[in-house]
Amino acid sequence: MHRRPALLLALVIVSGAACERLTPEQQLVHEAAEALGGLQPVVTAQAIVLEGTGRQFNLGQDMRPGLAEQTFTVSAFARALDLTAPRMRTTLTRTPNFAYYQGPQAQTQVQGIDGDVGYSVNASGVATRTSATVAAELRIERLHHPLVLLQLALDSDASLLPAPLADERARDGERAILMHTNAGPITLVFDGEKRPIRIESPGTHPNLGDVVLTTTYSDYAESDDLLLPTRMTTRVDDFTTGDYRVTSHIRQPDNLAAPAEALAAAVPGPPVVNVTTEALAPGVWFLAGQSHHSVAVAFEDRLVLIEAPHSEARARAVLAKARELRPGTPVTHLVLSHHHFDHSAGLRAAIAGDLTVITQTGNADFVSAMAARPFTRAPDALARGPQPVRVESVDDTRTISDRTRSLVLHHVAGNPHSDTLLMAYLPKERLLIEVDAFSPGGSYHPYAANLLAHVERLKLAVDRVVPLHGEVVPWAELVAAARPSSR
């Protein structure tokens, strides 16, 4: 459906000369084009460039589940869309407005799509090809612009269907059409003045399962013979992810072809899951091998797993490895350190494995909500084999013990990374197990002082820190990170 504008205009003129043969949906699209400045400027536009500023929200990574208070200031946002071919490039610079493990400096991100080739460009200018999943997401993102969709809808081959709206939306004069595109179904919603105000498409998310991706457009203003929106807000289900103020120009941007190294690269396959095992003490194992780690702790009649992070595949591999450590001994509990999506991505896999989840009280409702999410578009282990969710909450502290050992869980209250963070302590082994509050390596540790204060308040005797990012290190390294002036 990526026809040259001249042919597209010819098709529009023919259909416009016979309006009585237009379906209601086609008529709505024609009226929308007129509302934005006319059929001719809409269909002859070959590219559009959006430039502005805004903010992004920290989806799944805020201080508590459900919050949307942490933001990044987007000091520069630029998106170029080729309207004659499926190409798009987005460049943005953002700075966190909260304690962030990479520090407060600005970060520039570049991502694009060229046909089936998705790519990103790092700070050194090196381009890499994205996975097929990310490329598909970028193709959908490109369609989330009114001009792109109107041009597709005006094509004589377009399949347009009426889309239902909630009663209150219909009463406000909104109308909607459903289009089937080569990137999937997509819904375009118009206000009472026939201006496109919302674009919706179904999607999937590794933590949230079935989601609706929504881009809302408002505050239309004249630009280059067209009426174009100056505000763009993005959402994943009910979670706002971005809000931008932009100016738009109908002009040809720089070359939007994918960089040569991305075009030449093969499509990356799924990440290889590698689980290594290190015995930290008799009956205590460090399950590492990638960026996110876990710890298995053996009791007389069961194993307790601390953390099932990163992905469903990682969590399932970690569970399998834990079961190999003590054949015949069941893994009965998962200690979830906090709700952040990179650390709860394996939550549903653990529930599917019949594990009881232990987490800080502030995460309990989150665990139940994640277990209840629909996963019909990309069924995971829990969708394929439903299990009841069992959650045990920790307010301030909880001890799991038998005659072999004790495992003590403490709430790391007031930590600037998460309000609902747990750390684990093995008193006999003098091991502190924690994540995100301190990650060895690097020079910026904004959360370590709070962790150290809790350990000192509780008078815990610690020889080694077991971080679930990074390598096991002596206690002195945490002290030095929390008190850099003492080095």
Image: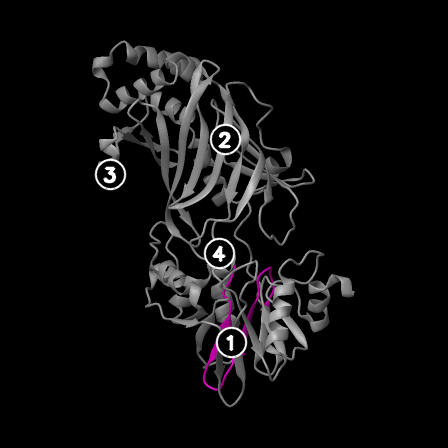
Residue stretch in magenta: 288-311
Label 1 SS: helix
Q: Residues within 10 Å of mark 3 (few under 14, many from 20)?
A: few
Does any portion of residue 277 appear in the rendered image?
Answer: no
Is 377 in front, or is 393?
Answer: 393
Locate residue 285: give its quadrant.
bottom right
Of badges 1 and 4, the one in the foreground is 4
User: Which residue does the numbered mark 4 point to in the structure image?
Assistant: 341
Give the farthest residue toward the top: 17
- Quadrant into which the N terminus falls: top left
Task: Name the amino acid, label 3.
Answer: Ala
Question: Which of disc 3 and disc 1 is earlier in sequence?
Answer: 3
Please name the residue shown 39% across and 52% down the image. Answer: 209
Name the residue that disc number 2 marks.
Answer: 245
Please name the amino acid that badge 4 sits on. Answer: Phe
User: Disc 3 to disc 4, how far (Cα)?
Assistant: 31 Å
Task: Name the residue carrying label 3.
Answer: 166
